[in-house]
Image (cartoon, rainbow, N blue to C red):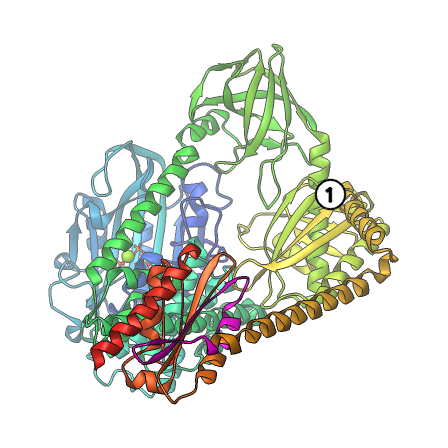
């Protein structure tokens, strides 16, 4: 049965059983604790936590998930993908254990002809929490599973919580026995690859208390409304129903694996057994490629771009691992252009947007592969240098430092360093490398802790939110002054009843016109006055947890008490300047997409008073002419004074109206769409100007790369743009004044000045060289005899470059001829640094006098280093005062060599 069919049957089955079918939320989700959605229940969390009331009593979904922790399992077990889809059915205070078990059993064992999955009951096992007699009894009573295949397990395996105080409960997992080829007899406790977990039923019935660890925490009560959360791995059940060995061989994944095998000329599976534990390394690599290519496709599809931290890093790591695995399989050419389209073709059945967005997705992926290939080239050069250095000192090791530097500076993975060092017969000090890595990790952790402790703990915010009992109402779209009430006061991260003048507090109002930083828009500033006369200055506004707006503020005078009536006044100039910038950002976004195509999607922005920056996806620099056009287009539309308006609509309506969809919207939410005339339409929660005319002027300051595939434009708006242009104008004025030309003649005049300057410099150079060479004849005539060697030692003084010195040295050498041994040493000082060149003729070399050796003597005296061939060598140092001494030493050494060789 095809994966798409399994998915269809799932949704049909639960829809028929009264569940609302909810589409998958995007992988990027607005949850501060999660990098990516990692389970089907994530989008429903607020309902389970009781923060919001669920719009349905029952729901079902097939949720896209990414589990970064499973990355190291990929290919080595049969059942872990980094990306996978979790089928779920959910009850919000509606049905409970009994029905959850009955549904699961029915769907799994109903024959395929009757719309089920048709699994034979003899293959199924169930686990229950050790004291959940109720569930155990239900499995016995309601299904055909015999008592010996109902296994009781402890908290670690069979008890679920969110890791914090709140709902929790026992779970019951369903396993499929895949048969003796896959491992040992004895049930899930013995072999989790043979007995594969396919479905986890969570019974939310209790309340977790404060404290405790992962496997033992206090359970302090029962939930008034019990809920169900289940998760079945779509890929896992597909591997069972398709009769393949693992989830990399199912219809949605295998074609990529097959393509990779073909490219590398490997015969997949030929050297492995059915169970993942007995797999050939090449087969594991092929699975890694297939898994990571698909995960990258899905991640980029949902708006992730490769980067060096967080989500971007996860994506980068997957892409690089895929490319790297291909290399290990012997494929050196770019791989993604051959693999990614195969994955897209398979996945588009369930996710049609992948095909639509494939231009953008592939661009991002291919660029990352190119970048990584360049890294490999750069790193290889460095590695080769390190290898030859190690060899020249007779070492058989590369140090941990070197491996670490390769990793840290060039992004060179350690396994690659190991492999390539081995090719050169060298070992790598891996222990040293790991120690340095660990040290770096510790530093990073300490850093993260330091950052986190600032506002990491959300307990106090939750307290205030609970007390308020609803979301803070944001009134700022319609007014900039609001009447409100103090809902909570926080001091140093804890709630307090009151605060006094001079204290830095965090203040929560039940409603507020202050915009909290978000969606790229900076926070409002302003003032809050209380009925008791207290005055508070607002510095910053944040949303530390969903639904709560917190003003970071200083109490200027009076006393701030919870419950007090408040008069909140937003700083209107700041707000207007920010709003103008935000509207300008939308317009520039739209104009850039008109110019570059729809792949130029937004990758970030910051809207500040009078200025903004806008990041977007583009693989190469945007030509200046395009930026000029974008700027002209936007400014022309300012003059048209387009109305800007906001509308609330469903996501579908937004998409239909052509709004540029951004990522991370929660499904089911109604969205706010901002339109500038009929022209730019975008999902946005920010504040805006009322008409485009209010922006006055938009000036783009330029464009630059800020990372692979992301470009940034910075711009000024309104009076800030005017001030900038006025300053530029003044500068032009000064230049026309100084150069005595009209402004349009400036470029040409400056060019001609520069050309003349260069010509003059060249002329000076030639003259200096002639001067230096002019001295040559008399210098050669004055050569001294050092034990039979003609020796010239000359200090050319300051301002003579190394090239001139070299020319002089070679000229002198040829003047001295080859009749008898000759050595020339000339030195000079350029930019405060002494340089010395030594040249020897053939006869001198036969006497054992070598330039490279002599230059070292000189350079050491000068406090530096140098080297070169036997005939000409160059060195330098730092101590310009020792040039004379250096030349004398050279002469002395010549003497030594000659006397020694006789
Ligand atoms: P395992 O112990 O096998 O890693 P788990 O306990 O982490 O599984 P749950 O967190 O209970 O799994 O997730 C619910 C279901 O999601 C599992 O029963 C399984 O079918 C599926 N699942 C979990 N992790 C993965 C993964 N990395 N790849 C594919 N499916 C997965
Ligand atoms: Mg797991």
Percent position (x, y) of residue 321?
Answer: 36, 69
Percent position (x, y) of residue 675?
Answer: 73, 51
For ligand 1, the image quadrant comes to bottom left
- Drawn side of residue 460 relative to residue 532, left or right: left
Magenta span includes 274: no
> Front-most of 18 and 832?
832
Disc 1 on helix, strand or loop?
Answer: helix
**Mark 1 closeness class: few <14, some 14–19, many ≥20 residues within 10 Å:** many
> Front-most of 28 and 399?
399
Quarter of the picture holding the N terminus = bottom left
- Per the image, the residue denoted by label 1 is 580
Magenta highlight range: 780-807
Q: Is residue 561 visible?
A: yes
Q: Is residue 674 visible?
A: no
Percent position (x, y) of residue 853?
Answer: 31, 73
- Drawn side of residue 686 relative to residue 5, left or right: right
Q: Residue at x 41, y 38 (%)?
A: 451
Q: Is mark 1 within 8 Å of ligand 1?
A: no
């Amino acid at each position: 049965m095809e994966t798409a069919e399994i998915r269809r049957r799932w949704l049909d089955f639960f829809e028929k059983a009264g569940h609302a079918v909810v589409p998958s939320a995007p992988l990027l989700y607005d949850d501060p604790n999660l990098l990516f959605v990692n389970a089907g229940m994530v989008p429903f969390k607020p309902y389970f936590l009781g923060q919001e009331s669920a719009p349905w009593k029952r729901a079902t979904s097939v949720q896209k998930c990414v589990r970064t922790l499973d990355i190291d399992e990929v290919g080595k077990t049969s059942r872990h993908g980094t990306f996978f889809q979790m089928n779920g059915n959910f009850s919000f205070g509606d049905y409970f254990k009994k029905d959850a078990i009955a549904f699961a059993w029915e769907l799994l064992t109903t024959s395929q002809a009757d719309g089920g999955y048709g699994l034979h009951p003899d293959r199924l096992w169930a686990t229950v929490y050790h004291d959940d007699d109720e569930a155990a009894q239900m499995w016995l009573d309601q299904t055909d599973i015999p008592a010996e295949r109902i296994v009781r397990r402890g908290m670690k395996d069979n008890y679920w919580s969110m890791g914090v105080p709140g709902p929790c409960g026992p779970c019951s997992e369903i396993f499929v026995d895949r048969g003796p080829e896959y491992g040992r007899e004895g049930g899930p406790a013995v072999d989790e690859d043979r007995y594969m977990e396919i479905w986890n039923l969570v019974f939310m019935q209790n309340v977790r208390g404060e404290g405790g660890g992962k496997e033992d925490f206090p359970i302090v009560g029962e939930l008034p409304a019990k809920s169900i959360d289940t998760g079945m791995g779509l890929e896992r059940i597909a591997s069972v129903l398709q009769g393949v060995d693992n989830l990399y061989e199912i219809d949605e994944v295998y074609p990529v694996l097959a393509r990779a095998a073909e490219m590398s000329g490997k015969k997949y599976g030929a050297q492995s057994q059915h169970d993942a534990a007995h797999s050939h390394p090449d087969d594991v690599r092929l699975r890694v490629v297939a898994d990571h290519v698909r995960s990258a496709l899905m991640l980029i599809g949902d708006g992730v771009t490769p980067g060096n931290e967080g989500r971007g890093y996860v994506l980068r790591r997957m892409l690089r691992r895929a490319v790297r695995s291909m290399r290990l399989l012997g494929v050196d050419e770019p791989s993604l252009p051959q693999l990614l389209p195969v994955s897209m073709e398979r996945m588009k059945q369930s996710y049609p947007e992948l095909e639509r967005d494939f231009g953008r997705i592939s661009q991002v992926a291919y660029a990352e592969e190119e970048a990584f290939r360049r890294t490999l080239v750069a790193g290889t050069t460095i590695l080769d240098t390190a290898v030859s250095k190690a060899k020249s000192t007779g070492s058989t090791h590369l140090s941990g430092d070197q491996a670490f530097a390769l990793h840290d500076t060039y992004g060179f993975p350690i396994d690659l360093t190991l492999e390539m060092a081995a090719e050169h017969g060298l070992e790598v000090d891996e222990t040293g490398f790991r120690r340095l890595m660990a040290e770096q990790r510790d530093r990073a952790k300490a850093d993260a802790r330091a950052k986190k402790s600032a506002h990491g703990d959300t307990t106090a915010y939750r307290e205030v939110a609970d007390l308020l009992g609803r979301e803070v109402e944001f009134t700022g779209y319609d007014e900039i002054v609001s009447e409100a009430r103090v809902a909570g006061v926080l001091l140093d991260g804890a709630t307090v009843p009151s605060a006094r003048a001079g204290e830095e507090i965090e203040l929560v109002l039940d409603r507020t016109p202050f915009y909290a930083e978000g969606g790229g828009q900076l926070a409002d500033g302003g003032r809050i006055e209380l009925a008791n006369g207290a005055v508070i200055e607002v510095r910053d506004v944040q949303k530390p947890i969903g639904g709560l707006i917190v003003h970071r503020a200083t109490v200027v005078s009076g006393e701030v008490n919870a419950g007090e009536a408040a008069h909140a006044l937003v700083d209107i100039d700041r707000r207007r300047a920010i709003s103008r910038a935000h509207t300008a950002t939308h317009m520039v976004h739209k104009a850039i997409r008109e110019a570059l195509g729809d792949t130029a999607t937004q990758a970030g922005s910051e809207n500040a008073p009078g200025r903004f920056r806008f990041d977007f996806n583009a693989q190469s620099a945007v030509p200046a002419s395009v930026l000029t056009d974008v700027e002209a287009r936007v400014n022309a539309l300012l003059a048209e004074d387009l109305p800007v308006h906001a509308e609330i609509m469903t996501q579908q309506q937004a998409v239909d109206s052509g709004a540029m969809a951004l990522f991370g919207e929660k499904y089911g939410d109604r969205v706010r769409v901002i339109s500038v005339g009929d022209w730019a339409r975008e999902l946005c929660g920010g504040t805006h100007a009322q008409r485009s005319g209010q922006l006055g002027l938009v000036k783009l300051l330029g464009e630059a790369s800020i990372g692979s595939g992301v470009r940034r434009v910075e711009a000024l708006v309104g009076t800030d743009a005017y001030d900038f242009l006025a300053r530029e104008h003044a500068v032009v004025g000064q230049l026309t004044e100084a150069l005595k030309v009209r402004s349009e003649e400036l470029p040409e005049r400056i060019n001609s000045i520069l050309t003349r300057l260069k010509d003059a410099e060249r002329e000076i150079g030639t003259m200096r060289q002639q001067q230096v060479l002019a001295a040559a004849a008399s210098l050669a005539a004055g050569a001294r005899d050092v034990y039979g060697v003609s020796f010239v030692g000359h200090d050319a003084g300051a301002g003579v470059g190394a090239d001139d010195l070299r020319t002089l040295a070679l000229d002198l050498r040829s003047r001295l001829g080859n009749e008898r041994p000759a050595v020339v040493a000339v030195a000079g000082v350029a930019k405060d640094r002494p340089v010395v060149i030594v040249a020897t003729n053939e006869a001198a070399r036969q006497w054992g006098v070598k330039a490279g050796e002599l230059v070292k003597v000189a350079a050491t005296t000068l406090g530096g280093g140098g080297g070169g061939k036997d005939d000409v060598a160059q060195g330098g140092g730092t101590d310009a005062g020792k040039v004379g001494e250096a030349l004398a030493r050279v002469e002395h050494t010549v003497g030594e060599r000659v006397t020694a060789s006789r």
